[in-house]
C-alpha cells in the first residue's frame, strides 16, 4: 500500500480528498494535517510515501513547506492540490520536483490518473532496483515521462508551442517516412511558418532529424524524419 498524508487547511476538502484517494486501489490515507505544526509533526511521525499538499495556509506557505519536505524527507513524493494558478507558483512547484500539480476544484478522474501514474513510477523503480543499481538513458527518459512533467515543462518553456498542435504534427510525421514543411502545412491545415517552427522544435527535442533535399530543380529543401520511425 502507498501511504498518503493529506495537508489541507479546509477539513471538508481534506475529507473529500481522502475519499477520492481511497477509491484508488493500492492507496491508504494515514493522516490529515490542517496547519503547519500538524503537518511537521505528522511528517516526522508517519513518514508517508506521498503527500497531497495545498499551497495556502493561515500559518505557513505551502511552497516553503514543499522545500522542507524535499530537504528533510527526500524519499517522500508530493502532489500539489491547490486553487493557485499563478505562473510563478506552478513553476516553483515544478522546480522543487513535485510529481504533479492539480488545480481545484479537484476532478476525481484527473487525480485517479495521477495516482495510477505514480503507482507505475514506483513499480518501475522497484523492478529496476532488483536487477541492477545502474540505469540507462532510456530508463531515465521513461521515468521522467511517467511523472507527467516532461510534456508540461518542455512545452511551457517554449513560447508559441501548443501541445495539441505538437502532438498532431508529431503523429503525422511518424506516419510518413519523411515530410517537408509544405506537406505538413497542407495535411494539418496550419501555415508554413507554423509548421516549420514545430518541426524545428521536434528536431531540437531529438524527436526528429532534418536533412537537405535538392529536388529536381536543385533548390535545397529541408526534409524531416521522425526518430521513432527510423528506430522501427
Image (tube, rainbow, N blue to C red):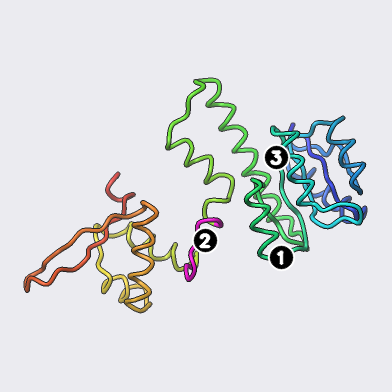
For the point 71% across and 52% down, the residue is 111
- Lower sequence index among marks 2 and 1: 1
Instruction: Name the quadrant containing residue 2.
Output: top right
Q: Nearer the viewer, residue 99 or 118?
A: 99
Which numbered marker is on residue 77? 3
Provide the residue span drawn in magenta.
152-161
Is 158 rendered above or below residue 126? below
Q: How far apart in space, not on screen, are marks 2 and 1 (Cα)?
A: 17 Å
Judging from the image, what secondary structure is the residue with disc 2 in? helix
Which numbered marker is on residue 85? 1
Count the marks. 3
Q: Are marks 3 and 2 in contact (CB under 8 Å)?
A: no
Image spot of residue 67 (x, y percent): 73, 44
> Quick one: label 2, few (<14), some, or many (20+) residues within 10 Å?
few
Instruction: Name the quadrant containing residue 221.
Output: bottom left
Which residue in the protein does label 2 denote? 157
Image spot of residue 22 (x, y percent): 80, 43
- Lower sequence index among marks 3 and 2: 3
For the point 68% across and 54% down, the residue is 101
For the point 34% across and 64% down, the residue is 199
Badge nearest the viewer, 3 or 2: 2
State left or right for residue 43 relative to residue 116.
right
Q: Quadrant of the N terminus?
A: top right
Is 1 rendered above or below residue 225? above
Judging from the image, what secondary structure is the residue with disc 3 in? strand
Q: How far apart in space, not on screen, are marks 1 and 3 (Cα)?
A: 21 Å
Q: Are marks 1 and 3 in contact (CB under 8 Å)?
A: no
Q: Quadrant of the C terminus?
A: top left
State left or right for residue 38 relative to residue 177.
right
Q: Nearer the viewer, residue 23 or 126?
A: 126
Amino acid at each position: 500500500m502507498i501511504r498518503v498524508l493529506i495537508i489541507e487547511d479546509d477539513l471538508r476538502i481534506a475529507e473529500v480528498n481522502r475519499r477520492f484517494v481511497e477509491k484508488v486501489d493500492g492507496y491508504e490515507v494515514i493522516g490529515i494535517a490542517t496547519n503547519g505544526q500538524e503537518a511537521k509533526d505528522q511528517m516526522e511521525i508517519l513518514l508517508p510515501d506521498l503527500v497531497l499538499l495545498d499551497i495556502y495556509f493561515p500559518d505557513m506557505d505551502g511552497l516553503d513547506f514543499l522545500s522542507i519536505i524535499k530537504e528533510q524527507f527526500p524519499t517522500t513524493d508530493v502532489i500539489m492540490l491547490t486553487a493557485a494558478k499563478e505562473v510563478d507558483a506552478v513553476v516553483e512547484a515544478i522546480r522543487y520536483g513535485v510529481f504533479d500539480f492539480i488545480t481545484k476544484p479537484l476532478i476525481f478522474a484527473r487525480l485517479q490518473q495521477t495516482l495510477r501514474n505514480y503507482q507505475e513510477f514506483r513499480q518501475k523503480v522497484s523492478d529496476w532496483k532488483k536487477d541492477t543499481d545502474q540505469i540507462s538513458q532510456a530508463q531515465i527518459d521513461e521515468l521522467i515521462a511517467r511523472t507527467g512533467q516532461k510534456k508540461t515543462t518542455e512545452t511551457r518553456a517554449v513560447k508559441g508551442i501548443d501541445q495539441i498542435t505538437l502532438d498532431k504534427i508529431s503523429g503525422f510525421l511518424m506516419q510518413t517516412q519523411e515530410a517537408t514543411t509544405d506537406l505538413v502545412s497542407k495535411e494539418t491545415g496550419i501555415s508554413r511558418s507554423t509548421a516549420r517552427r514545430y518541426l524545428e522544435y521536434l528536431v531540437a527535442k531529438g524527436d526528429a532529424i532534418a536533412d537537405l533535399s535538392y529536388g529536381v530543380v536543385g533548390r535545397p529543401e529541408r526534409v524531416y524524419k521522425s526518430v521513432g520511425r527510423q528506430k522501427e
